[in-house]
Image (cartoon, helix red, strand yellow):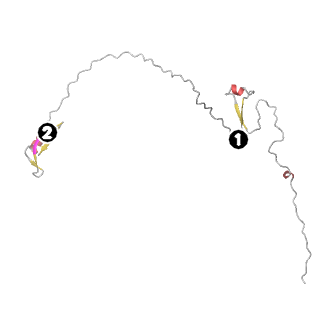
């Protein structure tokens, strides 16, 4: 018959739990922060606060150039533009200097008459054209006949039949 051995249970090692794991962190501080420094507001809330360094809540609205914005840095802040479409701002016409500068009058001078432009006399036909292809000469393989010459502008053009 098989033999049954004696059952043994070994010792268990349970590590000690540190004390800092026994306390849960709190999301809300237990005590409201109090400050003795009255010149700068300390605000423990998300977002931004506009305040004047000299103090007073109305002073930030009365002196907007001296007002400062204090933020905690956890939440972004945005002030939109105050747009009122029905409100119109009066605008003045620009002041433009319309005075004429003091200049002496320019004397009227007579315009000189120019002589007519000299035109060169152009012979048509030119002596070279008359010698090379006189009127009545057959050209281009006896297909065309020189019928004359015509002056167009300053150029003498050969006319053919």
List the residue tagged with mark 2: 150
Residue 81: image quadrant is top right
Name the side, left or right, on which 5 lies relative to 64: right
Determine the CA span between mark 2 and mark 1.
95 Å
Which numbered disc, 2 or 1, marks the residue that appears first in the sequence?
1
| Residue 108 x %, y % | 31, 17
Residue 5: image quadrant is bottom right
For this orientation, the residue located farthest to the left is 136
For this orientation, the residue located farthest to the bottom is 1
The foreground one among 110 and 32 is 32
For residue 137, which numbered disc appears in the image? Answer: none
From the image, give the main secondary structure of the stretch colored magenta: strand
Name the element at disc 2.
strand
The foreground one among 161 and 131 is 161
Q: Residue at x 69, y 29 (%)?
A: 67
Name the side, left or right, on which 97 lies relative to 152: right
| Residue 130 x %, y % | 10, 42
| Residue 131 x %, y % | 9, 43
For this orientation, the residue located farthest to the front is 86
Q: Residue at x 72, y 26 (%)?
A: 59
Q: Which residues are magenta?
A: 146-150
Q: Residue at x 71, y 28 (%)?
A: 60
Q: Quadrant of the N terminus?
A: bottom right
Mark 2 vs mark 1, foreground winner is 1
In the image, residue 148 lies in the stretch drawn in magenta: yes
List the residue tagged with mark 1: 75
Name the side, left or right, on which 109 lies relative to 27: left
Q: Is residue 151 above or below residue 106?
A: below
Q: Is residue 20 above or below residue 69?
A: below
């Amino acid at each position: 018959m098989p033999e049954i051995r004696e059952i043994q249970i070994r010792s268990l090692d349970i590590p000690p739990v540190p004390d800092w794991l026994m306390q849960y962190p709190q999301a809300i501080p237990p005590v409201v922060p109090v400050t003795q420094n009255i010149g700068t507001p300390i605000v423990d809330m998300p977002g931004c606060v506009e305040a004047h360094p000299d103090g007073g809540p109305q002073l930030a609205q009365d002196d907007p150039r001296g007002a400062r914005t204090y933020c905690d840095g956890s939440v972004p802040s945005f002030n939109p533009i105050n747009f009122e479409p029905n409100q119109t701002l009066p605008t003045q016409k620009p002041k433009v200097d319309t005075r004429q500068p003091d200049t002496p009058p320019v004397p009227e001078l007579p315009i000189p008459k120019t002589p007519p432009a000299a035109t060169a006399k152009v012979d048509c036909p030119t002596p070279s054209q008359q010698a090379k292809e006189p009127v009545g000469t057959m050209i281009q393989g006896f297909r065309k006949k020189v019928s004359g010459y015509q002056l167009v502008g300053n150029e003498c053009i050969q006319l053919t039949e």
